[in-house]
Amino acid sequence: MAIYHPPNQKSDRIPKINPIKQKGINENLIPIAIFPEQKFTNKEDLFNKGILLNNFNKLDNFLLLESNWNLNGAEKFSKNLIDLTKTVINSISIQPEIFPTGRNSIQLEWEKDNGDYLEFEVFQNEIICLEIIEKVEKSFAVKAENVNSIVRNFYGKQ
Amino acid sequence: MVNNEVSNNEWLYRMVLNKPNYWKENENRVSSAAFKDSKGVSVDRDGERPESKIIEELNHRFIEKIGGIVKIQAGFCRNSGAIPLSKPEVDNVYHCIIIGKESVELTNSIARQLSKNAITVMPFNQQISNISS
């Protein structure tokens, strides 16, 4: 059972300037049970945790989509695929935008202002990466454990 | 009567669902995920109809589901490596699907090209109100 921050409780887990709140994410919905001992040491960390939880919530909502949810015969998403996607995004330090596809996969996306683009399409049995950097495209299969390093590399982080 | 051959200068209109959300707010366009479908990407060709009529008809047909509408030219699809095919339905003679050359599904690269070059004709969640029934 998730434990929630009380609405008005002051805590050293929440900085005075809360980037999550600025992004319209309700800080009171951060279940601290997921990060029981973790101190949020900086705004970026807190921000990404908030987006992660928002993405978990999106994925849970994809599970509620019924067959033919796209009006073109798409199948219902399996819990296995949703759980796999949660495992992948939980390992990522910079959270993506997440979208379902009509071919039984979940798409993770990052895009920079300069047009550079990174995408992972998560299927039950494989993950396909599309990377476009300075208009040069690469597409390849990746293992779940390598996704974070590709994302960090995309953003120039070690 | 609508010709079976989709000409290069015809516009193809894609209804984008309101839920789940495919709109990328930062980029102000739809995600390429909206162009990934195991049965081909379902679109309506213009068939020489005025755009306002096409938008109105799509809003009518998908009144509870529609989030936005984007359009892409058939010639652009072909240049990107996709194939627009006329696939009329009993209640919609303008129906088409966009498929890949080697399989029905578009590659990630082609889906990306289509989403990036699609023109928004009905912005997300600005459905036409008071549509006459």
Image (cartoon, rainbow, N blue to C red):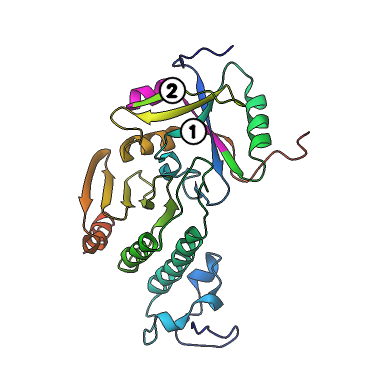
Which residue is the site of mark 1? B42
Q: Is residue A9 above or below residue B108?
A: below
Looking at marks 2 and 1 on the same chain, the residue that comes earlier in the sequence is marked by 1
Residue depicted at x 36% and y 63%: A80
Relative image position of residue A76 (x, y in whole percent):
46, 53
- Secondary structure beneath dot 1 equals strand
Query: Are labels 2 and 1 assigned to the same chain?
Result: yes
Q: Is residue B21 left or right of residue A149?
A: right
Q: Residue A25: which quarter of the image?
A: bottom right
Q: Which residues are magenta?
A: B69-81
Q: Amino acid at mark 1?
A: Ser
Please state the chain letter of the residue tagged with numbered disc 1 in the rendered image. B
Could you say which disc has been placed on residue B85 in the image?
Answer: 2
Residue at the image position 54 percent from the left and 70 percent from the top: A21
- Are dots 2 and 1 in contact, CB under 8 Å? no
How crowded pointer 2 is (Cα within 10 Å; few <14, some 14-19, many 20+) is rated as some
From this view, report whether residue A9 is shown above or below residue B132: below
The quarter of the image holding the C terminus of chain B is: top right
- In the image, residue A26 lies at what x, y percent? 56, 72
Reply yes or no: does residue B71 show up in magenta. yes
- From the top left corner, tell me how far across and down residue B97 is, in percent: 45, 29
Q: Is residue B124 visible?
A: yes
User: Distance between the Cα atoms at labels 2 and 1?
Assistant: 10 Å
Q: Is residue A157 visible?
A: no
Dot label at residue A142: none
Viewport quadrant of the N terminus of chain B: top right
**In this view, A67 is above or below A158:** above
Residue at the image point whose x is 64% and y is 20% from the top: B50
Letter of the chain that mark 2 sits on in the rendering: B
Amino acid at dot 2 = Leu
Q: Tag 2, which secondary structure?
A: strand
Determine if the magenta segment contains residue A131.
no
